[in-house]
Amino acid sequence: MKTVVSGNSWHPHGVPLSNANPVEVTQGSTHSILLHYDTRNNNHDGDSKLMQIWSHDDGNSWGSTAEPVGKDISGYMNGKGNCMPGPSVGVQMSNGNIYFSCHSSGWVFLYWSTDYGSTWKRSQEVSTYDECTIALNGYEVLMNCKTSPGNNARKMLRWSKDGALLETFSASASPGLDDSGTQGSLIKYGGTLYLSNTYEVSKFKRQSLTLKRSKDNGHNWDDGLVIHSGASGYSQLLPSGGYLGMGVIFEFGDVHWDASAQNHYSEHGIGFFSFAVPADNPASWPQMDDEVGNLTITEIHSAPSFEDLDDDSADEMSQQDLEEELKDESTDETGDDSAESTVV
């Protein structure tokens, strides 16, 4: 999906990809979008590949004649090329280094490039973590992860720019870092860390999407405020242009329980909500039982109801199908080309 009007309207753009993780890459005066994805979600057969593909025209077109579906970078992952990136976004350090996280069942690692995506290196694997999101802290990488089922708490890891694990610490003792075992989104904005995730502690209650804030790089978090009190799932925070403006794109739907089918969530669609970040004064920061007033969700994509977001039977798009889709995609754009654009 792409917006050129700061999230007020969206239109379909591109083809479906599994665990797509974008990052804006600056090289001199050139700005491009690098997208990492895998070829099969929830891959248990070991045949998935980790791929990267570039856009050099603000997401209007992707790939090249030589690499229409991108480049297979699985070989750089030292035997773990069937991992799933993110799912979130990548980050670029001021020295040009590009970073992503990757995971499979019960482990994660950081991987990075020092030559603008030509080659990649990865860190050690860290166990009992899953689906991590990353943000920069100077020349370090901060990582926030969901943990193994049943723990219901998010954890933090801190890495050097060269992929050395410097620190792991638990956020479970901090208010608001309980979690229903859902992906979250971490960004650093205005010198402060922000995290979106679902707050309910039961994995059968993916609801209460909240925004939380840390002033000490993830060691302590405030109670946060509720962005959406209803059913909600995966999310991604986005700076929305103006200072202290932010947006979040997220799944929303219904929470239910069917013991016979082990179902806990029905998706209605994908929503976007933009808001002003409250001031730093703690007295003005809404608490967990407060909700953003008059929440208006911009629904950018409706989806048929489906059961259980963790379904392992996701369809795989063949490389031939993907290549044909990318070749056929139109590059026509709508809206004001001078407006800020965002691709997710």
Image (cartoon, grey):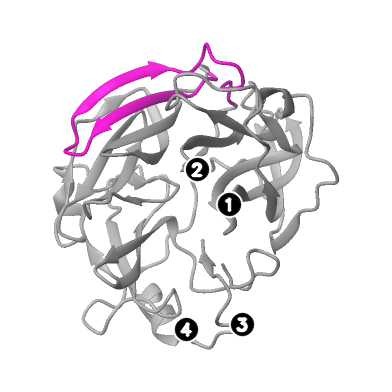
Q: CA distance from mark 1 to mark 2?
A: 8 Å
Q: Where residue 123 sits: x, y (%)?
A: 19, 36
Write the residue at 81% across / 47% down: 295
State which tag comes first along the sequence, 3 or 1: 1
Q: Residues within 10 Å of mark 1 (few under 14, many from 20)?
A: few
Name the residue beneath numbered marker 2: 190
State which tag comes first along the sequence, 4 or 2: 2
Name the residue beneath numbered marker 3: 336
Q: CA distance from mark 4 to mark 3?
A: 20 Å
Q: CA distance from mark 4 to mark 1?
A: 35 Å
Write the residue at 53% across / 36% down: 194
State which tag comes first along the sequence, 4 or 3: 4
Comparing labels 4 and 1, the label whose residue is closer to the camera: 1
* Snapshot quadrant of residue 169: top left
Three-letter code for the amino acid on which mark 2 is drawn: Gly
Comparing labels 3 and 1, the label whose residue is closer to the camera: 1
Against 221, is 268 above or below?
Answer: below
Q: In the structure shown, which secondary structural element does the residue marked by tag 4 occupy?
A: loop
Number of numbered discs overlaid on the protein picture:
4
Write the residue at 63% across / 73% down: 11
State which tag comes first along the sequence, 1 or 2: 2
Q: In the structure shown, which secondary structural element does the residue marked by tag 2 occupy?
A: loop
